[in-house]
Structure formats: C-alpha cells, structure tokens
Image: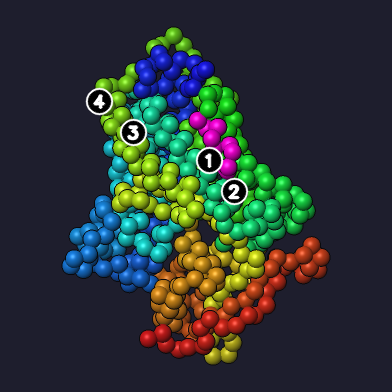
C-alpha cells in the first residue's frame, strides 16, 4: 500500500520526492490569491474602513482594548500604512508566483509566506464586518501551511501535505454537514431550484444554470452531497484513490466557478486539492511543474526544516481538536476561528437557502428625477447581464446582499448614504456608476425590490435578465444622514 507514491521513502520519512508538482501548485496558487487579496484591500479598505471610511478604524486602539493578535495596527492605524502594507504584500506574493523565493534555501519561502500570513492577518483583524468571510480565514490558514513546504533545495514535507488535506477535508465536509443540518431543501434535493437565482452575486451563466431542468438540479444536489460528505475521507487514502478524490473536488469547484461569484473561495480550494495529487498524475497537466526524469538524487531535507515542520505539525494536531469536535456537534459553527492565530478553523457555506431574492436599490434625486446608483456585482438594472468578478472580492456588493436579507447593516449603510450625499470620491469609486458624475444629489433613498430571473420567453421578448417589483422603502428620501 503506497500512501504517497513511488520514491517518497528515498527522501526520508518526513519528505516526499513525488510531490514537487503539488508544492509548485500550492505555493504559486496560494501566493496568487494573496496578490488578489492584498490588491482588493489596497483598493477598498480605505473607503470602507479607513480614516474617513464608512466605519473608520481608530488611529490608536482605545485604552484597555486588545484586538486579536498579531496586528501591525495595534499601535496605530493610517491609510498610508494600510496601503503600504497591502501593496508590499501584493508585490511580495507576486515574487512567489514567479517562483523566485523557491529557488533559494527553504527558509526563504518560509519567511515570505509567514510575512504574507502576518500582514494579511493584520488587515483581517482590523476589517471587522467587511472581512467576516470564510475565505479570509481560509487564505490565512493556507498561507501559514505554505510556509512549511520547503523550496527547490529540499524535498516536500509529508506532514505539510497531510495538513493541507486536513484543511480541504474540513472545508468540504464542514460545508456538507452544515447543509444537512440546516435547510430541508438540501435534504429533499430541491436547493438548486432557488440557489442560482438567490445566491449573493450571480455571474453570466447563473441565469442558464437556473433554467436547467429540475431533475438535473436534484442530480446536482445529490452530487454535491457525495462530493462533500463522502469524497473528503478519500483524500487520506493511498494513491491513486486520493488523486481521484482530489479530481472530484476540482470538478465540483469548477462547477461553482461556472455558476457564481464566490470571491476566491473556489479558486483557492482548487489549489489546495493539489495536495492530494502526486507528480505522476500532475505531470500530464503541468509538465513544467514536474522535474525531468533523470539519474540525479532528489534533494534531502535539512535537519532544521524537519524539526520545524515536525513542531508545526504537532501544534496543528493539538489545534485540530476544536474543529474536529465542531464538525460533529449539533450546534456546528460555520466559518469560525477558535484561536487568535486563525489556524485550525471551521468552514462551511449555505446552511440555508433563501427562496426569494430581494435587492436594495439606492437612488439620488437631482431635482427632477430619481437616478439609480450602479454597483459592480450586485443586480441592479434589469437589462444588465450579471458579470464575472471572482476571484476578486467586491466587499460592498456582498454586504448589500446581507442587508437585503434583513441582517443588521445600518451601522455601515447609513454612513454609506451620507457619503453619497456628500459625493465622497473614495466611496463613489466603489461603485460602477455614479449618475451624478461626481456631483452631490439633493436627496438619497433606499428601496427594496423583489428580483427574479426572467423566463426564456421574457428574455426573448424583452432582452432583460431580471424582473423586479417594488416591495417597500428601507430608507425614505432624506437630505441628511446626521
């Protein structure tokens, strides 16, 4: 029974010579997501949470408060410091995408990934509401583990690969369990009667997925249950079973990529699945990632790296108790951290499915008519085709979806309307369309509409993607949010 493929014992019990391609994908893929995350923060954080943002971050924490550690913003916050951290993180991550630190000794990519982990954790810990998404802590945990993959001068640590598989297991099995414990539509296989239409941010193909035959929707849900409740256990099986389990994860994630916008959740999961695929399987897909066969002896593993990886593995084993207990708890938590280091987290998504879609439409008055502000990703004008933005994360658009669900949000939405009344340039840059061209409206209002996809017939006759009907006012016409 060969657990890690041919040749892994030649490099010692802590290293695998058959997983260099997996390391190639993991390091570069995780770093690419870090690039997106840091760029997203540089472009959006100041307007949302900066010195003059919707929810301003205090320049200095109030005496006696201790935000989650570690954070570079323990001592002070400024937009300049945030931008410096975000753009520096993006550049540092880009060097890993190009493979530069991996050419050096194992400690070099280790330091780079730890810097990315600590830097982005500083942003997440300061981000509050706008950074409360599962893929934020998923990226942090993946970035931490990537620090212990070694470099081209060492074999790939086996312990790190097992921990990546454990991460994928928690991500997939946790999502499957939260669905089975949650909404009955997952149990009666009807969830996709609604999901493609009511998901947070539909993409260009969501309309077509929604109109697939209902029996096929049931097959989709059944396939999802198999992929999330059964297949994750096979990630720990010997090869080639583990590789086939990874292929199922990849297939289901690609299906989600095609049907919706979920920031970098699906892209990062695709990358993490590579931890269960050996060089012999990846060589056909990524020949440049697999060293050419030859008579050279594979590099070994320095004693210090083996010691560090072993210590890290033992620490992660201790931290595994809390997410493991959570997976089988009747009160399962979704997307939760059990420690300040954002490691050993609980994951999951869509434990409940909304049956109807509501959207908050924001309008301004120019003295003659109400004009609608346009958002990048959330549905707005009925004739506008949904766009593809993932793996980029549109934080304001996602929060607008939660607001339309009736979840508390006025603590940031009222300041948002106030920024529109003041024609704040930073806030307006978060939008796709400002109908006032940078000028201030006389009044603003927020109305709630019920949205649904057009039918095939309605689409042919009108060219529209949506039908919407006014439900009521969230915020009546106002000239001041003071």
For residue 313, the mark is: 3
> Mark 4 vs mark 2: which is more N-terminal?
2
Task: Give residue 147's position: percent from left, percent from top.
Answer: 34, 36
C-alpha distance separating marks 2 and 1: 10 Å
Q: Secondary structure at mark 2?
A: helix
> Mark 1 vs mark 4: which is more N-terminal?
1
Q: Image point 57% across, 65% down: which residue?
A: 378
Give the extent of the magenta segment: 228-236
Task: Give residue 253's position: percent from left, percent from top.
Answer: 58, 44
> Mark 2 vs mark 1: which is more N-terminal?
2
Residue 231 covered by magenta stretch? yes
Q: Which residue is mark 2?
A: 257
Q: Image point 42% across, 87% down: which residue?
A: 480
Q: Nearer the viewer, mark 4 or mark 2?
A: 4
> Mark 3 vs mark 2: which is more N-terminal?
2
Mark 2 and mark 1 residues within 8 Å of each other at the beta carbon: yes
C-alpha distance separating marks 4 and 2: 40 Å
Q: Secondary structure at mark 4?
A: helix
Residue 316 covered by magenta stretch? no
């Amino acid at each position: 029974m060969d657990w890690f493929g041919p040749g892994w014992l030649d490099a010692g019990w802590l290293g695998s010579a058959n997983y260099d391609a997996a390391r190639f994908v993991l390091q570069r893929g995780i770093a690419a997501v870090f690039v997106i995350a840091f760029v997203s923060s540089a472009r959006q954080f100041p307007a949302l949470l900066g010195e003059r943002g919707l929810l301003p971050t205090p320049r200095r924490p109030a005496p006696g408060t201790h935000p989650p550690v570690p954070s570079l913003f323990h001592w002070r916050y400024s937009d300049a410091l945030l931008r410096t951290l975000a753009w520096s993180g993006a550049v540092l991550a880009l060097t890993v995408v190009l493979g530069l630190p991996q050419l050096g000794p194992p400690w070099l990519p280790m330091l780079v990934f730890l810097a990315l982990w600590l830097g982005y954790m500083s942003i997440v810990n300061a981000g509050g509401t706008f950074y409360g998404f599962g893929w934020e802590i998923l990226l942090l945990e993946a970035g931490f583990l990537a620090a212990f993959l070694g470099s081209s001068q060492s074999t790939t640590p086996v312990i790190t690969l097992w921990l990546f598989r454990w991460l994928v297991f928690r991500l997939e099995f946790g999502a499957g369990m939260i669905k089975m414990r949650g909404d009955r539509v997952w149990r009666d296989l009807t969830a996709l009667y609604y999901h493609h239409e009511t998901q947070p941010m539909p993409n260009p193909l969501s309309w077509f997925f929604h109109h697939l035959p209902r029996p096929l929707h049931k097959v989709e849900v059944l396939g999802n249950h198999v992929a999330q409740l059964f297949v994750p256990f096979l990630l720990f099986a010997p090869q080639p079973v583990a590789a086939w389990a990874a292929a199922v994860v990849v297939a289901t994630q690609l299906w989600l990529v095609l049907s919706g916008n979920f920031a970098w959740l699906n892209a990062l999961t695709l990358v993490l699945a590579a931890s269960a695929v050996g060089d012999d399987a990846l060589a056909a897909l990524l020949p440049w990632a697999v060293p050419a066969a030859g008579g050279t002896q594979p590099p070994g593993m320095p004693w210090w790296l083996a010691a560090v990886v072993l210590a890290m593995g033992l620490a992660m084993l201790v931290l595994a108790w809390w997410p493991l207990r959570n997976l089988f708890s009747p009160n399962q938590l979704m997307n939760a951290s059990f420690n300040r280091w954002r490691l050993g987290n609980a994951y999951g998504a869509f434990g409940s499915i909304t049956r109807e879609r509501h959207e908050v439409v924001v309008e301004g008055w120019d003295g003659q008519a109400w004009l609608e502000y346009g958002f990048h990703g959330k549905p707005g004008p009925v004739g506008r085709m949904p766009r593809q933005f993932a793996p980029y994360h549109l934080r304001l658009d996602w929060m607008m979806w939660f607001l339309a669900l009736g979840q508390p949000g006025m603590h940031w939405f009222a300041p948002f309307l106030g920024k529109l009344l003041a024609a704040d340039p930073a806030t307006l840059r978060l939008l796709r369309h400002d109908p006032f061209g940078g000028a201030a409206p006389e009044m603003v209002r927020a109305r709630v509409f019920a949205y649904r996809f057009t039918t095939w017939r309605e689409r042919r006759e009108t060219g529209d993607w949506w039908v919407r009907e006014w439900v009521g006012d969230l915020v009546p016409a106002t000239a001041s949010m003071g």
